[in-house]
Image (spheres, helix red, strand yellow):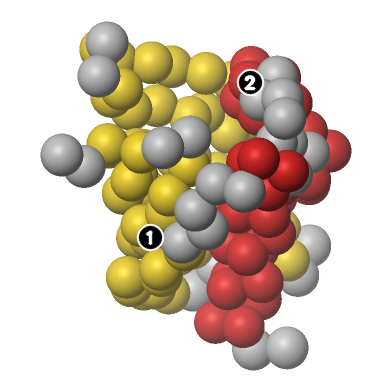
């Protein structure tokens, strides 16, 4: 699989984990040392992978079960060796997020090392 295809696969697995409230899926795409940081309407949020996985798991019913809008758009992928910067837009919990992922290739597979997020509108 090409680097670009592997990155896109990781991004798709990330989004499907959100859609199904799957914490195991979340953990599988993030590096264990990753951080999730960004702004929600109530201010700055900073989370570990475990914090984020727990938050995703707590969304019951899951967005998929509740029939929430599904939208994922990869805006850009820039690869430099074993690092990559990925920008995407997705719908989640009634909001549209713009995410910037810093990614690393670890043992031949791409993982999210950090996630910066912004809510549009």
Residue at image x 32%, y 70%?
75
The front one of 56 and 7 is 56
Q: Is residue 90 left or right of residue 31?
A: left
- In percent of the image, x 33 and y 27: which residue is there? 38
- In the picture of the structure, the residue carrying the numbered disc 1 is 88
Viewer-proximal residue, 89 or 106? 89
Residue sitting at x 38%, y 60% = 88
Q: Position of residue 120 (x, y in %)?
A: 21, 42
Task: In the rendered view, tell whether residue 51 sits above or below residue 15.
Answer: above
Can residue 31 be spotted in the picture? no
What is the residue that sits farthest to the right in this orientation?
24
- In terms of depth relative to the viewer, which is nearer, 108 or 115? 115
Label 2 element class: helix
- Indicate the quadrant where residue 43 lies: top left
The residue that appears at 58% across and 62% down in the rendered structure is 11
Secondary structure of residue under mark 1: strand
Name the side, left or right, on which 87 lies relative to 67.
Answer: left
**Quarter the N terminus occupies:** bottom right
């Amino acid at each position: 699989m090409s680097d670009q295809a592997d990155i896109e696969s990781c991004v798709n697995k990330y989004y499907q984990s959100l859609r199904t409230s799957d914490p195991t899926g979340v953990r599988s795409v993030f590096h264990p040392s990753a951080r999730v940081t960004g702004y929600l309407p109530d201010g700055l949020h900073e989370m570990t992978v475990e914090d984020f996985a727990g938050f995703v798991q707590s969304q019951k019913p899951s967005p998929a079960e509740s029939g929430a809008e599904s939208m994922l758009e990869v805006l850009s992928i820039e690869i430099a060796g074993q690092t990559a910067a990925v920008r995407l837009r997705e719908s989640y919990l009634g909001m549209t997020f713009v995410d910037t992922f810093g990614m690393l290739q670890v043992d031949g597979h791409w993982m999210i090392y950090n996630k910066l997020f912004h809510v549009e509108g």
